């Protein structure tokens, strides 16, 4: 066990609270930390570590402060990602009752032709957008950009927007690894190992957002780097009670927006569970076990068959995942269904049926 510097979540709209934290490390390289659960690596070809894991964040680094300033910020980012990757995977594995496949996290990806300030989760596929520089592990990788642009700290100081310093981005992408190896929404486990798909559905994106909220312990998960987006705008992706199936679009729209409906409903259901006197961890376990149970629907199915195509369509239905959650912990049925109902989600209906019903209820409310 080593002592490291990392951010811890707090209630302010900023990077978090800087703290000394324990990190269970198997080995260190010049720009790599190997953990029991994951390998975290900076891909930009600069030596960052010499045995010490306590660095200052250096305001995120970037092109303004000079090479040494940026090197320190990259080193902090590497350690920060390692800590939160371990924290998230250990929490999820504990709730599931078993470990998840070893995860590779690569920092400083896709820096050309311009800087990238985002993150994504990749599995091995025939093609990628943007293209990948080399093979991707079939079990999945998290890729984080080197950073782009500036944010402001709570005190108003500029902070380079490095994803490795942003807990919300880190946790969201790790959430995709959890979804891939539990629900497997896109049936990648049925496809040839190198011919998986990286396209995500709303349930995947929304589940990753609510897992992020659980890890951050707050619903406005992107309140720091999306603080210029109004709270009433769904692009903020705050887990807000206003997002119901009435605003669910479906089709070829951005799955992140529709995912906010599911994430918000989960957060409300979680609070209902707490109001009934249960620990919030009980809902978290119910969600993860529901994800895992839902994968049993693919048992015996062969990819490329009409049965598989029909199953892929059903995997998009929020009510379907809700049914698996109820099966995972029937005792929580009443508070969870009550929380979901506040967002227009009920058992036994398709997304289209839920949307039409929620929109009709909305019209009635306006008429009253």
Image: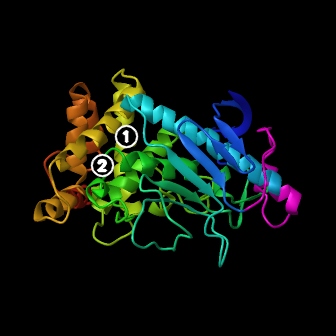
- For residue 363, what is the image quadrant? bottom left
On screen, residue 232 versus residue 26, left or right, reads: left
Q: Which residue is mark 2?
A: 343
Label 1 packing within 10 angstroms: few (<14), some (14-19), many (20+): many
Closer to the N terminus: mark 1 or mark 2? 1
Residue 51: where, in percent of width, then height? 79, 38
- Classified by dominant secondary structure, the portion drawn in magenta counts as loop
Residue 101: where, in percent of width, then height? 44, 43
- For residue 270, what is the image quadrant? top left
- Span highlighted in magenta in the image: 45-70
Asked if the residues shown at circle 1 and circle 2 are in contact, with their CB atoms under 8 angstroms apart, the answer is yes
Q: Which residue is mark 1?
A: 268
Does the stretch in magenta take in 52? Answer: yes
On screen, residue 298 versus residue 122, left or right, reads: left
> For numbered disc 1, what is the local secondary structure?
helix
- For residue 350, what is the image quadrant? bottom left
């Amino acid at each position: 066990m080593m002592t490291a510097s990392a951010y811890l979540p707090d209630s302010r709209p900023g990077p978090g609270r800087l703290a000394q934290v324990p990190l269970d490390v198997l080995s260190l390289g010049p720009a790599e930390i190997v953990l029991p659960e994951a390998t975290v690596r900076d891909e930009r070809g600069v030596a960052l570590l010499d045995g010490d894991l306590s660095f200052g964040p250096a305001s995120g680094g970037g092109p303004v402060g000079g090479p040494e300033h940026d090197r320190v910020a990259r080193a902090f980012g590497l350690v920060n990602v390692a800590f939160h990757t371990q924290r998230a995977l250990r929490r999820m594995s504990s709730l599931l009752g078993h470990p998840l496949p070893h995860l590779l996290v690569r920092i400083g990806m896709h820096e050309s032709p311009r800087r990238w300030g985002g993150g994504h989760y990749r599995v091995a596929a025939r093609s990628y957008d943007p293209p990948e520089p080399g093979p991707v592990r079939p079990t999945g990788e998290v890729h984080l950009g080197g950073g782009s642009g500036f944010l402001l700290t709570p005190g108003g100081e500029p902070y380079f927007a490095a994803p490795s310093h942003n807990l919300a981005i880190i946790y969201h992408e790790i959430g995709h690894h959890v979804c891939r190896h539990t629900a497997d929404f896109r049936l990648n486990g049925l496809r040839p190992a190198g011919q998986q798909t990286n396209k995500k559905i709303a349930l995947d994106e929304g589940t990753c957002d609510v897992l992020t909220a659980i890890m951050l312990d707050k619903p406005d998960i992107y309140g720091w780097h999306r603080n210029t987006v109004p709270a009433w705008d769904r692009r903020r992706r705050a887990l807000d009670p206003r997002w119901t199936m009435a605003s669910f679009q479906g089709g070829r729209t951005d799955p992140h927006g529709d995912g906010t409906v599911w994430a918000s409903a989960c957060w409300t259901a979680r609070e209902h569970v707490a109001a009934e006197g249960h620990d919030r961890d009980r809902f978290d376990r119910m969600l993860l076990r529901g994800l895992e149970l839902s994968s049993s629907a693919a048992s015996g199915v062969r990819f490329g068959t009409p049965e598989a195509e029909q199953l892929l369509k059903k995997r998009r239905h929020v009510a379907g995942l809700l049914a698996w959650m109820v099966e995972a912990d029937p005792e929580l049925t009443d508070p969870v269904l009550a929380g979901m109902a506040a967002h227009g989600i009920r058992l036994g209906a398709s997304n289209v049926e839920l949307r039409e019903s929620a929109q009709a209820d909305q019209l009635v409310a306006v008429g009253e």
